[in-house]
Image (spheres, helix red, strand yellow):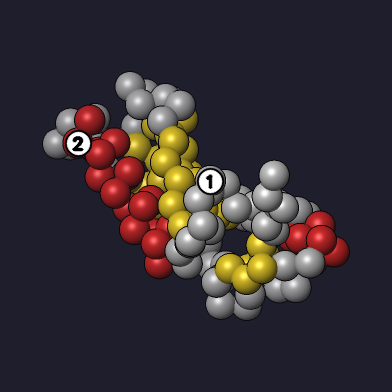
Amino acid sequence: MNAVRLYALDEQGEPFQATLDTYKLMLYTDCTVAMDIVRDCTVQTVFLGVDHGDRPGLPVLWETRVTGGNMDGYTMQCGGGRAAARQLHAGVVAVVLKDNGPVAKAKRFWKRLTHTA
């Protein structure tokens, strides 16, 4: 069995492998990267802090989840840095917008990542 790999975010919002103590401190912060509301759907991307990948390589540290609407419960995860997480979020928002019709607009909440060790 592989050891659990823990991560935290630096001042620029980029992940780094963390000690258990640093990871525990991060648990007390809001790890939301972005949130959009499209009609009755909420699309939220969060920093997970634990590598959810099952293979070597980029750690899977970000998850985007849809709550409400036709895509309720839909989730996607990705590896990489903050830019990858924002691309994932934007892609899911685009799908939700299309699924909700051409007049749907998103109300966007971007959060500046400032988690420090």
Provide the residue designation for mark 1.
54
In this view, which residue lies farthest toward the left? 102
In the rendered image, the vertical position of residue 67 relative to residue 86, given as above or below: above
The residue drawn where x is 32% and y is 44% is: 93
In this view, which residue lies farthest toward the bottom? 11
* Mark number displayed over residue 98: 2
Q: Which is in the foreground here, disc 2 or disc 1? A: 1
Q: Residue 110: horizontal and vertical position, in percent?
A: 46, 59
Dot 1: what SS? Answer: loop
The residue drawn where x is 76% and y is 60% is: 23
**In this image, 34 relative to 92: left or right?**
right
In the rendered image, the vertical position of residue 40 relative to residue 52, given as above or below: above
101 and 27: which one is in front?
27
Confirm whether residue 4 shows in the render. Answer: yes
Q: Quadrant of the C terminus?
A: bottom right
Q: Residues within 10 Å of mark 2 (few under 14, many from 20)?
A: few
